[in-house]
Image: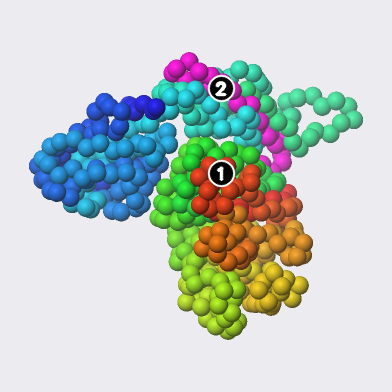
């Protein structure tokens, strides 16, 4: 059983934080939350209509804050009268912050100021992992990280405290970790020993819920020497979230746990539904860019510029160490149909016909437009490295070779445009740098949940590598992996999987120039 509370904050501040403002005159209606086992709202309006409605959205995004559609509501009901009540079921919702909107005539114009509501679990307070490593600190520089979004359960008003750890680290009641690590220049170095580039601060943080329950998290903060680069290794991931993860029960905690344990620093997300990048960043205490629909980026380090969206892609600039070390990142989610491996394996089409259908799918013009948008960045990749990652919904020419002909339904030497064009533009497939042999390391990302096409009685699903992390510039590939957590049950029996998506993730570890 879960308890519902009104958020005791001003929602306007939330909307301003999301960078949006209502665009019409001040609404004349009202919307308020009443007590009850479900979200029960009381409403009134001078403009009643049978298709006025109340919808619930995540507070981290998706609601029509500009009175325009962004993403679908999570639950909704019509509110037809001049006044009345509506009940919205919370059965499908996970604990968290939500926003309720009272909207006009099957549209998105506000009839009342939206209100924030919170859904709390009656479970004891808990962290998704026993230990976590945060973003890097530098000696002699102020440091701050946010832990408050990681906890679940315990009821409203969870507070945090430092139990043990390095003296320079403070933990505030809201879960903010802060302080300034001492410079090694201020400490004596034993004779004959050099100062290390790396050290770590360790802190144990305790969360106490309103119900009195407690949980602890062991936190590690890597500390770089004052005269060394802040980031010298970078974990870059591409992750198709599969409708934000919502196809799997308990997806939020499972996603957060995976991201914390993966070692990723920067993640390009697909299928975010316009909200889930913001949700995950809020939980992790990271920075984010949320695209209008599928795309999003989350990062341990600040996103200092957004390049907007260009035909199934979007780009950002991430400052790893202020102006001293930055990367440009482009994230793509290319069209999914028609799908080339089906054309080959199920329909026996010729290569020329399949390549024509690659253009028909939108993938070829989408990757062309993306590379055009990236052209200035690629020209300057020697100064600012460039990353291109995402769900390309097509295989690579590096995987459809003579050696893999049997695995690929009898076809070989297929020049898939979505891999050939990035290569011609100067980008390098990081997975094939780490694993040059496609026979020994296929790197399959589609699909851990679909061994068969059309269900268990269907034909075998072509298994391919369709998710990629490319790079250009001074980045050294240390390793690259296709990642799946646990042993996921295939669809349709996937609801209890620990793995929350139908793709494998790709994680590449890079060394950065010193």
| Extreme-top residue of the structure | 212
Q: Which residue is mark 2?
A: 215
Q: Which residue is mark 1?
A: 497
**Image quarter of residue 433:** bottom right
What kind of element bears circle 2? Answer: strand
What is the CA distance from the residue labelled 2 to the residue labelled 1?
A: 25 Å
> As displayed, is residue 216 above or below residue 12?
above
Earlier residue among tags 2 and 1: 2
Q: Residue at x 74, y 60 (%)?
A: 441
Give left or right: position of 429 versus 403: left
Magenta region, residue range: 205-230
Give left or right: position of 413 versus 371: right
Q: Residue at x 12, y 37 (%)?
A: 83
Question: Magenta stretch: residue 217 in it?
Answer: yes
Percent coordinates x, y for residue 340 in the rendering: 56, 73
Give left or right: position of 415 versus 356: right
Q: Residue at x 33, y 47 (%)?
A: 73
């Amino acid at each position: 059983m879960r308890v519902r509370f009104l958020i005791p904050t001003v929602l306007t501040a939330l909307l301003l934080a999301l960078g949006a403002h209502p665009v019409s005159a001040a609404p004349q209606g009202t919307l308020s939350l009443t007590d009850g086992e479900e979200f029960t709202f009381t409403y009134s309006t001078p403009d009643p209509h049978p298709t006025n409605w109340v919808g619930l959205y995540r507070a981290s995004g998706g609601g029509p804050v500009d009175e325009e559609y962004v993403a679908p509501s999570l639950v909704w009901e019509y509110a037809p009268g001049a006044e009345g009540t509506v009940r919205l079921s919370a059965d499908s919702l996970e604990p968290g912050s939500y926003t309720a909107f009272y909207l006009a005539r099957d549209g998105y114009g506000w009839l009342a100021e939206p209100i924030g509501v919170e859904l709390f679990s009656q479970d004891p307070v808990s962290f998704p992992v026993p230990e976590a490593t945060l973003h890097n600190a530098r000696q002699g520089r102020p440091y701050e990280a946010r832990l408050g979004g990681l906890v679940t359960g315990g009821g409203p008003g969870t507070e945090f405290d430092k139990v043990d750890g390095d003296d320079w680290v403070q933990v505030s009641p809201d879960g903010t970790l802060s302080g300034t690590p001492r410079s090694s220049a201020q400490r004596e170095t034993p004779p004959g020993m050099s100062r290390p580039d790396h050290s770590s601060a360790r802190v144990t943080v305790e969360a106490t819920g309103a119900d009195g329950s407690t949980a602890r998290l062991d936190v590690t903060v890597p500390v770089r020497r004052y005269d060394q680069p802040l980031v010298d290794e970078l974990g870059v991931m591409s992750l198709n979230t599969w409708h934000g993860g919502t196809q799997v029960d308990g997806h939020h905690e499972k996603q957060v746990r995976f991201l914390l344990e993966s070692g990723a620093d920067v993640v390009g997300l697909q299928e975010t539904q316009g909200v889930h990048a913001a949700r995950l960043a809020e939980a992790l205490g990271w920075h984010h860019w949320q695209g209008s629909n599928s795309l999003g980026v989350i990062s341990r380090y600040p996103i200092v510029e957004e390049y907007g969206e260009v035909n199934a892609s979007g780009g950002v600039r991430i400052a790893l160490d202020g102006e001293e070390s930055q990367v440009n990142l482009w994230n793509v989610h290319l069209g999914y149909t028609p799908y080339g491996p089906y054309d080959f394996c199920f329909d026996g089409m010729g290569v020329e016909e399949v390549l024509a259908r690659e253009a028909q799918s939108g993938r070829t013009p989408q990757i062309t437009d993306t590379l055009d948008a990236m052209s200035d960045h690629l020209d300057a990749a020697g100064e600012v490295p460039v990353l291109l990652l995402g769900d390309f919904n097509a295989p690579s020419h590096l995987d459809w070779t003579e050696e893999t002909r049997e695995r690929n339904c009898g076809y070989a030497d297929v020049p898939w445009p979505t891999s050939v064009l990035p290569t011609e533009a100067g980008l390098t497939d990081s997975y094939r740098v780490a694993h040059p042999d496609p026979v020994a390391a296929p790197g399959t990302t589609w699909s851990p949940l679909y061994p068969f096409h059309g269900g268990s009685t269907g034909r075998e699903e072509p298994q391919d590598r369709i998710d990629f992390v490319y790079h250009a510039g001074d980045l050294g590939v240390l390793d690259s992996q296709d990642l799946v957590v646990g042993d996921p049950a295939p669809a349709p029996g996937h609801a209890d999987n620990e793995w929350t998506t139908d793709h494998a993730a790709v994680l590449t570890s890079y060394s950065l120039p010193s």
